[in-house]
Image (cartoon, rainbow, N blue to C red):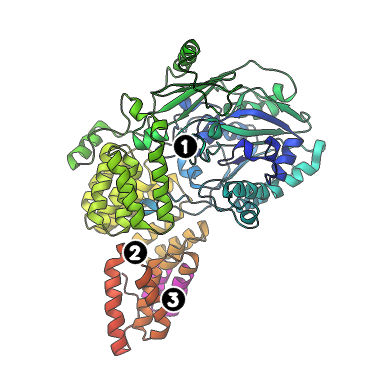
Amino acid sequence: MTVDTLRADAIGAYGYRDAGTPWMDRLAADGVLFTRAHAHNVVTFPSHANILCGRYPIRHGVRDNAGFRFPADMETIATLLRSRGFHTGAFVSAFPLDSRFGLTRGFEVYDDHFGEAAGPAMRLEHIPRRPGTETVAAARRWMAAQVDRSFFCWVHLYEPHWPYAPPEPFASRFPGNPYQGGVATADAALGPLLQPILAQGAGGRTLVVFTADHGEALGDHDEITHGILAYEATLRVPLVLYAPRLFSRRVVSEPVRHVDLLPTILDAVGLDAPRGVDGSSLLPLAAGGARPAAATYFEALTAAATRGWAPLYGLMRGSEKYIDLPIPELYDLATDPREEKNLAVSRPQDLARLRSLLLDLRRSDRGLQPARESPEALERLRALGYAGGEGARKVGYTEEDDPKRLMSLNTALSQVIGRYDEGDVPGALALCREVVASRPTMPQALHYRAYLEWQLGQRDAAIESARRALALNADSTEIAARLGYYLAQSGRPGAAASLLEPYSRRREPDVDVMTALAVAYASVDRTADAVAAFGRVLEFDPSNALAVLNRGRVLIQAGRTAEARAAFQRALQLDPSLGLAHVSLGLLASQDGRTEDALAEWRRALELDPRAYEALFDLAVTLLQQGRIAEARPYVERYLRDAPPTEAANVARLRSLARATTRASHGAPGSARE
């Protein structure tokens, strides 16, 4: 069981009074609680990769949430146990663990039905997720089918993650502390999963491994959430082993690591860990014994990957913690657990020793290496004006690039997202422009600016901002996909295709890149190429409901309406909350002359997504054309009031139609959107 963004000290068993975590506390009370457990990364995808394969990120190569894919030839807990006859299932709650990123290896079932990101035009920093109760319910159904069968089940919950929005009663129970409300929400969600296991006591045959992928800073060292720094608030995690048949309750104070979990699980079922793993079994410690002390490697590379800041690497050995940055840091966690006294200057010999150990460990590390473009592709991008200048990942860094000196910019970017989420898009853009002005070489800030400009209808400005961001970080498929989408939607699909085709030729191309490329192809009636592009998306991500939906929309262009209808129905099977599928089914119904069915589909789309402006527009236009002015009025008023600047052309069309219909009070049936 992994709970995202869960600080160890947010749990009652780790000393938090009134934490609201009775199930986690019961598990810890009857299990083995490790007080000094650490992650190796402070973001979700690489941290879970470490857990599942027992190797450091320098071995498996996944260094950040975006731009990486877990290697297809690396063994994991799931592949190893499945090869020994275990049934394997994974149930995850948020997009960073989507099947497209490769952690599906070895799992017979990989349930990532949490809804789809809306491709390259998605909301700013919006992470598709589902409630932990839904994830647990799916896991319980699968486990119930494993009667008298050996199984390995991974369950991941996302509740404590920002933006903190706990439901009732937890929001009221923790006023002013929504993060803790999220922790309590996750605990309650785990209850139905843990209750039958705990009830079996010593007679049970289930080993439970409970941990978090990383913690949450909550303002510690000026970091609001996580991902940039690597202090204990985000690096230290809870860890509990529960198996009364194997060991009794105990508290272990020796340092342990995420990479130890694979060898531990294999040891518990009598299997040896494969050669090359970085961890070792915790069963000797859990049984009250000892094991050789080992160092702990860690890193935080998001800021280097997305902002051009210095990469953070580090090492812990015993109570000493070394952080390798342009301004190096050394702490003694035994006497300074809050890391307030940097000993780098006063203890140079200890600093040099730990630095040497870190260099030895990283000797074969290629550094931050996402999927790179070929020299030919980069040359083509430069010719198009999309690559060049100072890259996001420099060769050398100075103290001015040290992340801890740049946390005010990190805070400002968080405020940009906050203003956007509150509906203040102009205010978000104004603040984002200030961030760009203060550090023009930060790709992420330019990327945000592009998105906000696009939302305000400033299309040329958005394209220029995205172009500048990509010039700073040509390896970013996220930026490339967004720029390609903007070009295609601005009447330049040929330029979009030229930009995206080099990225599409990767052995495992990015899903959003292929989606944007398909949109570009569809815009110039290259329907066969568009259908093929969506087909490639589904090769790597077969449960991608949005890709299934978009493929259906291209099939409409090709006149293959029966296939399109089947695609929309399949998309709803994959994601019943996908309002766009109902919009498309409504369009088909309208084309068939089934007006009432079309209206019902569009109303359903609005129930699922109040921001489904396409459904609003189609309802308003169709009802006006039917002469049903009173029914149309609320949809017309809502669309004209709420539609974003990107809908400007249709706003003008609807105003004109509304005026004409009011005068004539009749019109022809059918949707105005083709």
Tag nearer the camera, 2 or 1: 1
Tell me which residue sits at (19%, 42%) in the image: 384
Q: Where does residue 241 sit, x and y in percent of width and height? A: 69, 32
The answer to whether 609 appears left or right of 461 in the picture is right
Residue occupied by mark 3: 599
Work out whether residue 40 or residue 215 is closer to the camera in this orientation and state it. 215
Q: In the picture, which quadrant includes the C terminus?
A: bottom left
Which stretch did the figure color magenta?
584-605
Q: Where does residue 662 sit, x and y in percent of width and height? A: 31, 86
Q: Quadrant of residue 89?
A: top right
Q: CA distance from mark 3 to mark 1?
A: 51 Å
Q: Is residue 67 above or below residue 481?
A: above
Q: In the picture, which quadrant includes the N terminus?
A: top right
Residue occupied by mark 2: 644
Residue 132 in the magenta stretch? The answer is no
Work out whether residue 123 or residue 440 is closer to the camera in this orientation and state it. 440
Tell me which residue sits at (43%, 75%) in the image: 598
Q: CA distance from mark 2 to mark 1?
A: 35 Å
Work out whether residue 467 or residue 396 is closer to the camera in this orientation and state it. 396
Between discs 3 and 2, the one toward the N terminus: 3
Q: Where does residue 107 sit, x and y in percent of width and height? A: 57, 40
SS at circle 1: helix
Between discs 3 and 1, the one toward the N terminus: 1
SS at circle 2: loop
Tell me which residue sits at (24%, 57%) in the image: 490
Going by the numbered disc 1, the residue's amino acid type is Asp
Q: Is residue 294 above or below residue 25?
A: above
Going by the numbered disc 2, the residue's amino acid type is Pro
Residue 464 can be seen in this image: yes
Residue occupied by mark 1: 222
Tag nearer the camera, 3 or 2: 2
